[in-house]
Image (cartoon, rainbow, N blue to C red):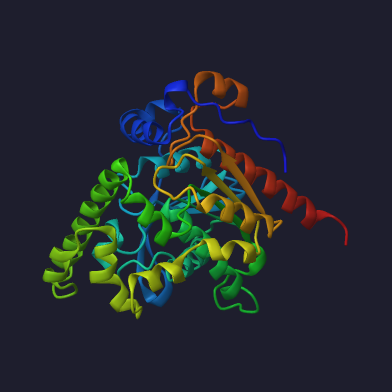
Amino acid sequence: MMCYAPYNPSRFLQNGVAMTVYTVLWGRRYWEKTTPHPEPPYHKTIFMGGQDVPIYCWVAIPKNAHSTIVATYGITGDLNQEWFLRLLGRKAYAQGYAVVLFDWRAHGKTAELSPTLTSDGLYEGEDFVRIAAAAASMGCPSKFWFAGFSLGGQLALWGLKAAAKLTQGSEELGIKDSDIGGGVVICPSLDSMRSLTYLVKQPIGKYLEAGIARNLKKLAWRIHDVHPGSLDPEAIKRANSIWGFDHELVIGRLGFPSVEAYYQASSALQLLPHLSKPTLILYAADDPLFDPAIIPDLQAACAENSLIDLMLTRHGGHIGYLNSKQGQREAQDPDPWWAWNRALQWMDQQRVGQESLSLSPR
């Protein structure tokens, strides 16, 4: 693995909570001014995911595209509002990647198309693979790179697991195992049980959790309104926390006896030693949303798999990684978005390496 520029944030952002909050507030307002690249000419379309769930996607293919990034966002949101994901779309398209961004299950336009609720990767993993196959039929070139951040990072990791199962020994999908390049995840959720327990015990964590829970409740009401009879309104009223949302609305449909069992089954930490494609994980030690006790387990799991590159940084917060001017110069980056710049740099390195292998004489 090449040597990457270390992350060097401003002094006042060398705190996970400060970085997380500042990046959200500043980025939402100014992100478009940080990049010279225009919005790609997205084609808005619907692909069929696993279990024939319709998934709303934005697809853009530049001239002479060399490979494709398939990506989604975190626990709540939609494509129109997810500026951090759209920033990736602009940067990647400008560097020759075809880009497929999607509203995952129960989010955005996908929620209007289907009342199917979230499964934290158990079924969204197959969605990633089927989206890649559909994008290939539209002209998106392999290799395909799965990307996501926060809970979306967990989904992307499940996508890599699903790809290994769905593409090997089967021509049904229209893509094969060698068409999957790998994955990039930023601040992925790895152990929901430990992190949620940790989050609600922290003063700032209680505030963050409550905000996420309110957005989940809005999501549920929206599905209820668009798909009458699909969700019990009394259950939605009782879903006043992340845990409550999963308890009242999710686990019964998925067949789990408890939220604990659901979180254990969907945890991405268990996947890491078994991933069969190159994977980059960017993770900040001061991420305020996740239990710090997960970090030694993350390091151990990655150490078991030579295909995983773990960039564990001292600072960065939760999907922050806003670089200082000095850090930007040191990294020779065109903008302050350290994590996406490392992600694209890593994908380029992997892509060139894989192309060289395919061209070398046997």
Position of 231 compared to 151: left or right?
left
Q: Is residue 136 visible?
A: no
Q: In the rendered image, which quarter is residue 39 located in?
A: top left
Along the line of sight, which residue is nearer the eye, 57 or 124? Answer: 124
Q: Residue at x 46, y 28 (%)?
A: 14
- In the visual, does 154 lie left or right of 44? right
Can you give x and y, in whole percent of width and height, for residue 312 in the image?
A: 58, 42
Horizontal and vertical percent position of residue 279: 61, 54
Residue 78 lies, in percent from the top left, at 31, 51
Q: Is residue 228 above or below residue 144?
A: below
The answer to whether 274 is drawn above or below residue 2 in the figure is: below
Q: Quadrant of the N terminus?
A: top right
Quarter of the image where the C terminus is located: bottom right
Residue 159: give x, y in percent of width and height.
51, 64
**Res. 316 visible in picture:** yes
Q: How many marks?
A: 0
Left of 279 or right of it: where is 91? left
Write the residue at 18% across / 70% down.
Answer: 227
Residue, far right: 362
- Residue plotted at (55% across, 45% down): 282
